[in-house]
Every structure is written in C-alpha cells, then in structure tokens.
Image: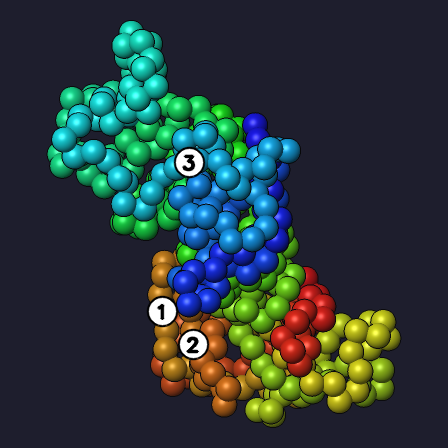
Amino acid sequence: MTKVTFQNVSKTYPKGIEAVKQVSFEAAKGDLLVLVGPSGCGKSTILRMIAGLEDISSGRLYFDSELMNDKLPRQRDVGMVFQNYALYPHLTVFENIAFPLTIKKIAKKEIKKLVEETAKMLGLDDLLSRKPKHLSGGQRQRVALGRAIIKKPRVFLFDEPLSNLDAILRVQMRSEIQNLHRKFGTTSIYVTHDQVEAMTMGSKLVVLNHGIVQQIDTPEEVYQNPANLFVAGFIGSPRMNFFEGAISIRKGVSFVESGTGNSFKLPNDMAAAGYVGNSQAVTIGIRPESFTLEKNISRQEIFVKITNIEYVGNEIFCYFRTNESNKCLRCSPDMKFEIGDEVALKADPGKITIFDGKGDLIRSTY
C-alpha cells in the first residue's frame, strides 16, 4: 500500500488560467479518498496530475517518500479507470484485460491464469471472447476495472467511472468497487461530482470548489460540521435550507431573527460560551430532516405554504418558499399533504448549523 501526498500543488494553463490552487491533502495507505465538487472545480485535473497525464505547475506530489513530479506515467505504477471506459474496440475482453501484462511481455501462460482469475472475480468469465461493442455499459466498466486490477498497481485512480451508467447499475458498481477496495486494500483516489456517491464510498472526502480545497474530513463530519456555506449547500440531498438573520439574546436565551420574520431558538450555551453575540449577523442552516411539524403556531415556528411535493417511495420532499429562496422539508410518506397546504414547522435546536457573515462555520449543534 502507498501513501499519496499532495503538497501545495497548483496547475496553471496558458493565459494564466489557474485550475488548481495550492491544493494539499494526503491519502493514507489503504484509503479510499474521494475528490468531490461541481463540474470545473479541478478534481479531474488533480487526478491527471497524480497519473502523470498533466504536468504540475508548482508544488510536490509524493508516493510514500518518493517525489513523483518528473516521473513519466508508466513509471508511476497506477491503475486508472476512466469515465468513457477507454477500451480497445478491436480487442476481445480477454485481450483488453491482458493488455497491461502483454506490453510488459509477461509469459502467455501467466497472463492466461491472471486474466481468468480477474474475469471470474468480476463476473466476466463467460464474456472473454466478446468485443466491447457486444457488451453493456456495466460490463464494459467491469472490463476497464479488470484492466486496472490485473496490474496490481500502487494506486488506483477512478475518474467519474459511473457517470455513463443508469441509476441501478451505478448503485451496483458502487458496491463492487467498494468490495474490490476491501479485498485488495490498495490506496484509491476517486473523482465524482455526485455527492451521494462521495458520501457512500469515501473513507475521506476532499471537497473542492474553483480549484480550492473547502474541507477535508470523513463523510460524517462533512455532513454534520460543514466548514462553510458552500460545503453545507453542496453536501446533502436535498440541500440544506439557509436563513439569514441576526442574533437576539433574550433573558440569556439565544435566537436568530430572520429577515422573513421567523425566529429560531438556539441551544442555551451558545451565547454563554461566546459562540455568538447580540445583533451578530449570521446564516443558519437546517437540514430538511431537522424540521418537525407543529399544530400550534408560536414565535419559534415557521408558517409556510407548500409549493411542490416529490414522492420518492420511503419519504416525501415538501418544498416551500420564503422571501430568500426555495426550501425543503423531508418527512414520512404517511403525511398527507397537497400543494397549497399551510403548515407550521419547528427547527430542532440540536441540529442547527450557524455560519458567520463571511459564510464560515461558527458552530454546528449536531
């Protein structure tokens, strides 16, 4: 197993276009580290720099203690799985999987043994004579995985490998990649824009935006303690609800008074511990599942009108609008709502995330 270290790495293209800005992170030995962020945030560029397909403009890349900046791709010993599979259309499944060993001039008998073992593990043993055009998308992705696995590389790199698959296949392939990671224990770096994929697969997340690292932590910490408003809004589906307002301290109890006339009670220790001060401008974040329905309207509740309903089987998403933006309530499908219904909501004080005027985390009450 290999540790991968990025130290203050930047990538600048011609005309001064800076795609990656002073990025630092470490994938420990055996990690499945996920780079996640919106399109254009630099995550694939980072992966290509690790593979040696892009030059590093500044900073350092290490595999363990070995500096890799000037190493050629073939000298880095990585197995890379691409979004578009990158299979050779004129070769059979057997020949595609065997290709990395063939160019190393491994004995044919050994190649046959290793390909058959790999194919059996991936459920491809009955497809070895087929060519890629006769395979489904999921089967092609398995062939691409087999070609990377058979090399037994120091590091696995996955560049949005599931983007071209339908929803059912994506779930299935997620599970297969996780099983392979547990089996081999090879340090793996996985790129995706899908935050559900990131949350379910990664042992550690690196959240990126505009080429800058926003937060590095476990999926649980990123969800419960997002470093800033961007992370809070990007991680979570449906996204976190935001309300802008100011702190009001009344008889030792802290509230956030929003510009829409709503009032949110905060845990009693917030002001006493110095987290917030009277009249301080803040933004609070409330996850869709952190609202409860209330029968009676009081100052600590939000009175809203439902504008849209999404039924997804085991739960429903009820959307409502304040003066600021659309927001969402997640609740049980047993709740019977119709568009236009007016409901009173109360936020759980133990599940409120508070950000300062710059959008940085003050404290999460999770």
On screen, 293 above or below 120?
A: below
The residue under the point 43% across, 76% down is 319
Q: How far apart are the two marked residues, 3 and 2, measured between alpha carbons?
A: 49 Å
190 sits left or right of 128 in the view:
right
Label 3 Cα neighbours within 10 Å, binned few <14 / some 14-19 / many ≥20: some
| Mark 3 in CB contact with mark 1 (< 8 angstroms) | no
55 sits left or right of 267 in the view:
left
Q: Earlier in the sequence, mark 3 or mark 2?
A: 3
Residue 263 on image: x %, y %: 65, 86
Residue on which disc 2 sits: 319
| Quarter holding residue 346 | bottom right
Q: How far apart are the two marked residues, 2 and 1, measured between alpha carbons?
A: 8 Å
SS at mark 3?
helix
Residue on which disc 3 sits: 73
* Image depth: mark 3 or mark 1 in front: 3
| Quarter holding residue 172 | top left
Residue on which disc 1 sits: 310
Q: How far apart are the two marked residues, 3 and 1, measured between alpha carbons?
A: 47 Å
Residue 93 visible in the shown view: yes
The residue under the point 36% across, 39% down is 81
